[in-house]
């Protein structure tokens, strides 16, 4: 799901300054990077190097070592370059700096706590294929619907599910319940049993749904459920 890759990210990185500097000064400079910042992607990057804005939700200097190595935790919009933040902090400090190490610890709702090793995957597959034991595999594989936890959702009536599976819009009469969202937001569509149906863009604010007797609410751009799993309710 591309919307997960476009969700907020959180990183732990090590910044090395080119001269010694007090930890308190680095913390003060880091505060200036909270909010909307301007960034031009580094020379060695996969995108066009044009000036753009990115939002840094939080930046914290966790600790320092030898007045040159500083451990940072940064949460930001996707597409924010951590090594550019380190470089720019070095410019403001007046002594230069670069990113020495980087680790992503969150992408959207997914964190490091759910990670498994390739060895664990290999062993789980072996047990499933050769011993007919899927216990370990079930611990590793997550239901697709987990990925919808980071966005508002609409619960559909069973009679509306198959039409959407064929590409129809989600209309007001087929909506059973919903969470708050605004026009243009990404919204997940699920069944009464919690099965993922589709992901789409809201055509109206959720506040309007209660007054709507008919009309389009969500235009799907990614169908998740197979056709004809639910009965066809349209003529």
Image (tube, rainbow, N blue to C red):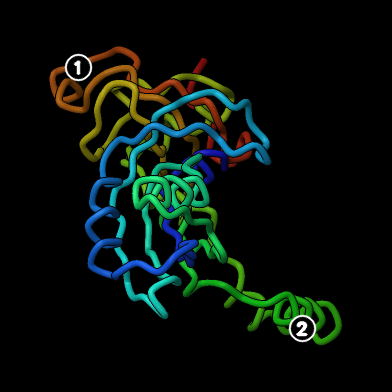
Q: Which image quadrant: the N terminus?
A: top right
The reply, left or right, for residue 25 in relation to residue 198 is: left
Task: In the rendered view, tell whether residue 197 sits above or below residue 163.
Answer: below
Residue located at (52% from left, 51% from top): 83
Callout in the foreground (1, 2): 2
Taking depth in this image into account, of 81 and 144 the one nearest to the observer is 81
Taking depth in this image into account, of 60 and 16 the one nearest to the observer is 16
Task: In the rendered view, tell whether residue 133 sits above or below residue 201.
Answer: below
Residue located at (29% from left, 48% from top): 57
Could you say which disc has been placed on residue 212 in the image?
1
Total marks placed: 2
The reply, left or right, for residue 62 in relation to residue 219 is: left
Residue 194: image location, x then y, percent: 41, 52
- State the separation of the CA atoms marked 1 and 2: 52 Å
Residue 85: image location, x then y, percent: 44, 48
Taking depth in this image into account, of 103 and 196 the one nearest to the observer is 103
Residue located at (45% from left, 26% from top): 52
Could you say which disc has been placed on residue 123 in the image?
2
Residue 122 in sight here: yes
Reading the chain from its start, which is encountered first: label 1 or label 2? Answer: 2
Residue 7: image location, x then y, percent: 44, 44
Residue 232: image location, x then y, percent: 54, 28
Residue located at (82% from left, 81% from top): 126
Could you say which disc has been placed on residue 227 in the image?
none
Local SS, label 1: loop
Looking at the rendering, which quadrant does residue 116 occupy?
A: bottom right
């Amino acid at each position: 799901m591309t919307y997960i890759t476009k969700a907020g990210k959180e990183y732990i990185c090590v910044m090395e300054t080119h001269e010694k500097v007090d930890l308190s000064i680095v913390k003060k400079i880091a505060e200036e990077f909270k909010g909307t910042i301007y960034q031009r992607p580094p020379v060695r990057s996969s995108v066009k190097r044009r000036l753009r804005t990115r939002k840094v939700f939080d930046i914290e200097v966790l600790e320092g070592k030898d007045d040159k190595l500083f451990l940072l935790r940064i949460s930001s919009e996707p597409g924010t370059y951590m090594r550019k933040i380190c470089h720019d902090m070095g410019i403001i400090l007046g002594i230069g700096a670069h990113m020495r190490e980087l680790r992503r610890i969150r992408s959207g709702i997914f964190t490091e706590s759910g990670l498994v090793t390739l060895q664990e995957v290999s062993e789980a597959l072996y047990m499933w294929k050769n011993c007919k034991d899927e216990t370990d595999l079930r611990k590793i594989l997550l239901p697709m619907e987990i990925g919808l936890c980071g966005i508002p959702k609409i619960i559909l009536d069973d009679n509306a599910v198959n039409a959407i599976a064929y590409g129809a819009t989600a209309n007001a009469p087929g909506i059973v319940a919903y969470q708050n969202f605004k026009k243009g937001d990404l919204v997940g569509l699920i069944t009464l049993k919690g099965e993922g149906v589709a992901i789409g863009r809201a055509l109206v604010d959720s506040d309007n749904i209660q007054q709507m007797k008919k009309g389009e609410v969500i235009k799907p751009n990614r169908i998740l459920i197979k056709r004809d799993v639910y009965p066809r309710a349209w003529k």
